[in-house]
Image: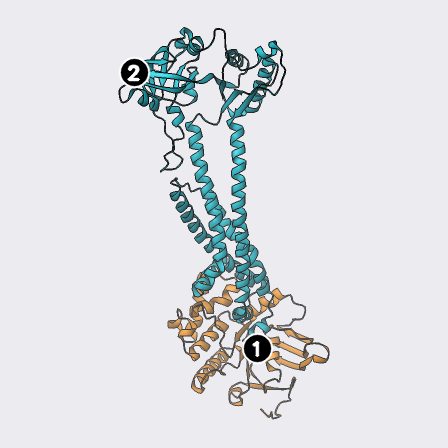
Amino acid sequence: MQPLMSLKDITKVYGEGDLSVEALKGIRLEVGAGDYIAVMGPSGSGKSTLMHILGLLDSPTAGSYQLDGEEVAGFSRRKLAHLRNKKIGFIFQNFNLLPKASLLRNVELPLLYGGMGRKERRQLAFEALARVGLADRAKHRPNELSGGQRQRGAIARAIVGRPQVIMADEPTGNLDQQTGGEILELFDELRAGGQTLIMVTHDPSIAARARETIRIVDGLVLPNGQQVAA
Amino acid sequence: MNPTQFIQEGFVEIREHLGRTLLQTLGVILGVASVVATLGMTASMDARRDQYISESGGTLLMGVYNQPPAVLEMTARQRAKTGLKLSDAAAIRNTIDGFDLVVAEIGRTHQVRAGATEERFRITATEPQFMQMRELAMGSGRYITDHDMETAAAVVVLGSTRARELFGTADPVGKALNIDGKAYTVIGVTAEKIFFWQRSDTYNAHEWLNRLIVVPITSYMKRHQEAGAKDIDELNLRLRSSEVHKESRDALELLLRSRHGIEDFGVWDRVERMEQGAQEDMIYSITFLACGIISLLVGGIVVTNIMLASFSERMREVGVRKALGASGWQVFTQFLIETMVVTVCGGGLGLALGIVFTFGIMSIMQMEMTITPLMVVVALLAATLVGFFFGMYPAVKASRLDPVVALRYE
């Protein structure tokens, strides 16, 4: 079967000339539908850059990235925004909920940008909040919620548009161990439902929850089994 | 994409940063207020002036007066032809169709005596249509008639003020009046005519009409001028309509010039004066409007500045929105609509402030205020345009933000 995401020799160089920094030095990676992958590596290893490229927020300097069989290079900004909206859901370490909007409005955002009508939007947003157990908090603002609740709200926002891939960047990094555990349980549930998940973390115990772990050091994917000095 | 969501978000922004937003729109508020106040005051004063003009004979009045030419040497024949004559009035009536009223007038000061009261007053010798032309009404008795003209009757009509001065509170109709020793009978008193420019004014702009002592022009010529003299001081004319203004005036000047053989008269013309007045008003209006527009421009720059200043705290927001799939166009639209919501609200406040300001000025001047729909339209349109043009740059900037950079921004 054709992989959902296929990366070949992806490099990313920031800056030019003497000041240039090679963040990714030729990444090869395949993500299949339904995979649950943890991307591990020390800070500065390039895992965030990889995440941004996978999530279509950034474009590689060279190499080929096929999403759903389509070569992403050369897509217009508009097309990329459209793909982000339809195929990818983001979860951030610091939740990144809009502070001025209610949880419900936050969750509605991807549907709004997708051009969905108000009524349908509201319905789906409620359903997504119910899935993460926050239906009774829909009208609350982020600052009225606990960290765990905020991250669950962010998960609702990520899943509301039924994207093919959920990308989580250190999703438990700002949470205590127990709350973090709840989030990871939610990921397990999503995974059980067939959701593809890619999670960036530097914590081996969290990475262990994933089905597969990729280690990145210094812009390269380490072969399986090799230990990382984290 | 539904813009109502963005309008909603605009209001959320306003609510969240009330102080900042107020500061941001202050220029717009003041600019709109000054534009509205200009329009309001102009409209109020125009309304008042229109009222005065219609109450004093309308816009269609014209007049011819003697203006001896600066020619030193004239032959006796020439001299005999110059000056306005009663026959000029007849000639105009017979040959120029554009005037529906032609009224000759002589005004001189004479010794006037009524009972024990004696004083020098100005006598106005004219024709019956004078009443129509000056929109006069009778208080008691009647006005001079064509019959009085034909018979050169020794009758006199008094303005209300003069009647009081000469006869006190008694009704003067039927009483005798002596002008330079000639006996006249009072046949009527005109109703008092009042027009105050300002409510508390003590100056009645129509008072001169209340101080008239009117006699038939034929009676005056017979009793107070040497025999055969047909000289008059003034011709009052009224146009049938403003469409015939130009042709009638040209015909009038041509006729008088050919009859007199020389340009020995001047013409006053309300249509012309109105146009001059409108031009002068325009200069004031333009000055005030220019201030308002400059204020709006400065206000617009402030709008842009504050949008840009608040930009850093919204970088992350833009990043998040883009990560969730907002296109550059959607971010642009959101920011632009947000700015426009802010400026239009400012425009609304400015409109209210402008009306309050106009009301204040008008009540100080004791004048009534007129609010026109134009004020509302201009206020909201100006605010919308300012929002659009000055919101453009921040919106473009936001839409072009690189999502990775924006998300990383702390």
Confirm whether residue B324 shows in the render: no
Give how far apart the Cα atoms at labels 1 and 2 are. 121 Å
Q: Is residue A110 left or right of residue B162?
A: right
Which of the pair B308/A212 is nearer the observer? B308
Side of B261 relative to B148 (left or right)? right
- Assign a secondary structure to mark 2: loop
Q: Quadrant of residue B262?
A: top right
- Let me know if marks 1 and 2 both belong to one chain: no
Residue A2 image offset from top left, x and y in percent: 63, 76
* Chain shown in cyan: B
Kind of residue sitting beneath label 2: Gly
Q: Secondary structure at mark 1?
A: loop
Measured as percent of width and height from the top left, residue B317 is found at: 52, 70
Residue at 49% of width from left, 15% of height from top? B232
Tell me which chain appears orange.
A
**Could you classify mark 2 by the number of other residues whose Cα lies within 10 Å: few (under 14), some (14-19), or many (20 or more)?**
few
Above or below: residue B407 compared with residue B78? below
Q: Mark 1 — residue?
A: A33
Subunit under mark 2 = B
- Kindly identify which residue carries mark 2: B115
Q: Amino acid at mark 1?
A: Ala
Asked if B151 appears above or below B244 in the picture, the reply is above
Q: Tell me the quarter of the image containing the C terminus of chain B.
A: bottom right
The chain carrying label 1 is A
